[in-house]
Image (cartoon, helix red, strand yellow):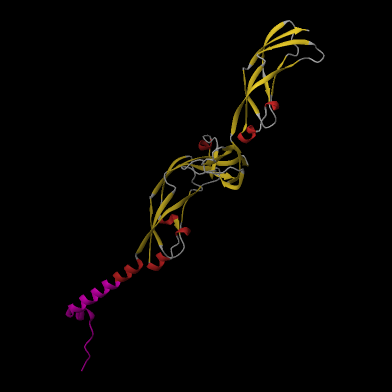
Amino acid sequence: MALERFKLPEMLARNKGGKLVALGLAFITWYAIQTVINYETVVSDVTLNIELDDGWAILDRSARTVDILFRGSQEDIRFLNPDQVKATVDLRGRTQEGTQVIRLRPKNVTAPGAARPIQVRPDEITLRLDRESEKQVPVKADLQGAPPEGYEVERVICNPATVSLVGPRQRLDEVESLRTAPIDIEGRSRTFKKLKVAVQQPSETWVARMSPGHVAVEVSMIERAATRDMAEIPVRVLVDPGVRAKVDVTPIRVMLVVRARAEQLKNLQAEEVSAFVDTRGLKTGASYELPVRGVAPQGYTVVTVEPPSVKVIVGEL
């Protein structure tokens, strides 16, 4: 008896139920595979690096960071390290002055592992480029808070006092100074020094290269100066050597306002300060209105003399 030839199409035609079962199994298998490999995640705020030809800088940009959609298996997504995700646009050889619109695609993204970048958001950025320039800019310390009552900042020294700033020429023309990262002086009454304080970028909308990027900052604290009235200080007369003259002064006593630290002023005695008028070179037999000069020990400053001048009559003996 001859064997009947096996014909698949005829078998399938006869077995419609089997076909439906096979189709269902294929769909379930496809769905299971897609479920395994189609996990998605978004890595947010990835810094967008722009590579330019030497001598060029970014004047303005519509975005500094991007969000990237990744797809892969559950294991691929689990091992995706956001810190190693990079987004780069290479404009070397295509740099030109003015405004450019750059499309962002998955090919601009690099990341370790098997997870695939699918989409970059935003999908385009606007750049405005300018020629690069360099400028020396002074640095100022950004002091936050306040010292205790009775104390104040005497001086602040940044070392180095200036840093080199490299960036778009138009932006550098607008920069007068740079500030450090905040330095807390709340409750401080003693001089202190920080050896490494970061220098802040001049703007949040564009980035400059700085050298150095850190400075040392010394903050000198002193007790706040106070003043004290030293009343009834006699006015002395300064005359030429060898000259004998009669000098009348009106009034004969003045008040000196002396400034120093509060603790110092408590110990200051009236005998330690003086006031005088200078009559050297003046002709006798005449009347003058002369300024009174106050003198105080080192560490003290005479800020005011009351009255500021006196009437002086120079006569012969």
Does residue 4 lie above or below 165 as drawn?
Answer: below
Identity of the residue drawn at 43% across and 50% down: 65
Question: Is residue 192 or residue 247 the one in the foreground?
Answer: 247
Does residue 90 lie above or below 10 as drawn?
Answer: above
Identity of the residue drawn at 69% across and 7% down: 287
Identity of the residue drawn at 61% across and 45% down: 192
- Is residue 4 part of the magenta span, yes or no? yes
Image location (x, y in percent) of residue 38: 34, 65
Q: Which segment did they paint magenta?
A: 1-29
Which quarter shows the C terminus? Answer: top right
Left or right of 28 in this view: 105? right
Does residue 242 lie above or below 264 as drawn?
Answer: above
- Magenta residues: mostly which secondary structure? helix
Question: Is residue 298 or residue 221 the one in the foreground?
Answer: 298
Q: Looking at this view, name the residue that lies furthest to the bottom.
A: 1
Does residue 27 lie above or below 42 as drawn?
Answer: below
Q: Quadrant of residue 3?
A: bottom left
Q: Quadrant of residue 159?
A: top right
Image location (x, y in percent) of residue 136: 60, 38
Which quarter shows the N terminus? Answer: bottom left
- Is residue 316 part of the magenta span, yes or no? no
Image location (x, y in percent) of residue 161: 62, 39
Q: Looking at this view, name the residue that lies furthest to the top.
A: 285
